[in-house]
Image: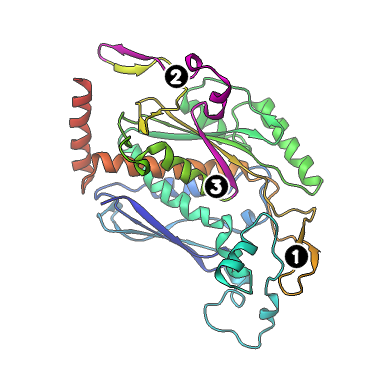
Amino acid sequence: MSLRYLTAGETHGPQLTAIVEGLPSNLKIDFDELNFQLQRRQKGHGRGRRMQIEQDTAKIVGGVRHGRTTGAPVAIVIENNDWKHWTTVMNVEPIEGSDETKRRVHRPRPGHADLNGGLKYNLRDLRNVLERSSARETAARVAVGALARQLLAEFGIKVGGQVIRIGEIEAPKHNLPLDEIIRLTEESPVRVVDKETEAKMMAHIDQVKQEGDSIGGIVECIVEGVPVGLGSHVQWDRKLDGRIAQAVVSINAFKGCEIGIGFEAARLRGSQVHDEIMYEEGRGFYRATNRAGGIEGGMTTGEAIVVRGVMKPIPTLYKPLRSVDIDTKEPFTAQVERSDSCAVPAASVVMEHVVAWEVAKAFLEKFGGDSIEEIRANLDNYLKQVGAY
């Protein structure tokens, strides 16, 4: 069975819910690690007041017994602490004659899903759109991705990430090992390895916030230890790079994705783009460089997967943008709801988890079995086959 999940819940509703299907049995779940990943998403210089309200923890309510998966669907709940302030506004039961109905949202915000969603679903209260389209939903996706991450770790596959750019400030290139990147970025409020760049980025975020504006950036995810051959060239929707790109651009406010050197390849010659193939006894085939970012022809090469995503500035500004009231059709300046000035460091964490999910999904498609033991046997046999090639 293919690995899949669904999420449900609103930003001011009682909880976020996720159901994961397709995890094998006997995967040991590290609950502290799961919650650690959720807490990472809430950090970062430039976050808004919501992160002070919520202290995200995941409660597994199905599919796990005595610390191990059973092979049944895994159900996860993340409670919203802010729900207590929204129990009338977001009540699932009809509310008649309440003052809360006066809080109907009829002024769409530029850059959000408000107007498009209202038109598409014929909703006159745009809160029915913004509650679900909120980036709060990414907490559920991080929880789901954290399970995928633990599955990958079981087979020696490691996932990490870093911020490459925030607004005008770009981090210098480096060749640090992934373990060092993980250690240094975890200590940084903007998830960069370089202290001088960190200070410049934080000052830039503060300046932009003071001006009533917001800022975006570029984040990078690296996956090491992936065997050759995940994904496939034989059909468009089986190409792993395509699936990863779709997952990345599905993150709220993400507008682009590149793999390896990505868009830089447009200005280079072929000799500067493609990775030469090498062979060494005991090591097998490998690439002299990794400009392809670990994927060629829709399949993993055995080198590290390197993915970058572009996040636009958050559209809810303290410097209001113009819009039009859906009731009166009169222009207005968009009202401010609680917002971040920069969520790029947090988005880096989200991207790690959506990429981890796609890699885990492709991994199970290749080595799938109903239990961890069966998958390990399948992987071992495949690695022997590749080693003898």
Tag 1 or tag 3, which sits nearer the N-term?
3
Locate residue 181, reporting x and y percent: 52, 28
Inspect the magenta stretch and tell me whether residue 176 lies in it: no
Image quarter where the C terminus lies is top left
Establish if 263 lies above or below 120. Answer: above
Residue appearing at x 19%, y 36% in the figure = 378
Q: Which residue is mark 1?
A: 324
Alpha-carbon span between mark 2 and mark 1: 50 Å
Model colouring: rainbow
Badge 1: how crowded within 10 Å, few (<14), some, or many (20+)? some
Q: Amino acid at mark 1?
A: Val
Is mark 2 in CB contact (under 8 Å) with mark 1? no
- Which residue type carries mark 3? Arg
Residue that carries the numbered disc 3 in the rendered image? 41
Task: Locate residue 96, reporting x and y percent.
Answer: 61, 87
* Residue 312 visible, this orientation: yes
Between 365 and 187, the one nearer to me in the picture: 365
* Left or right for 115, reference 269: right
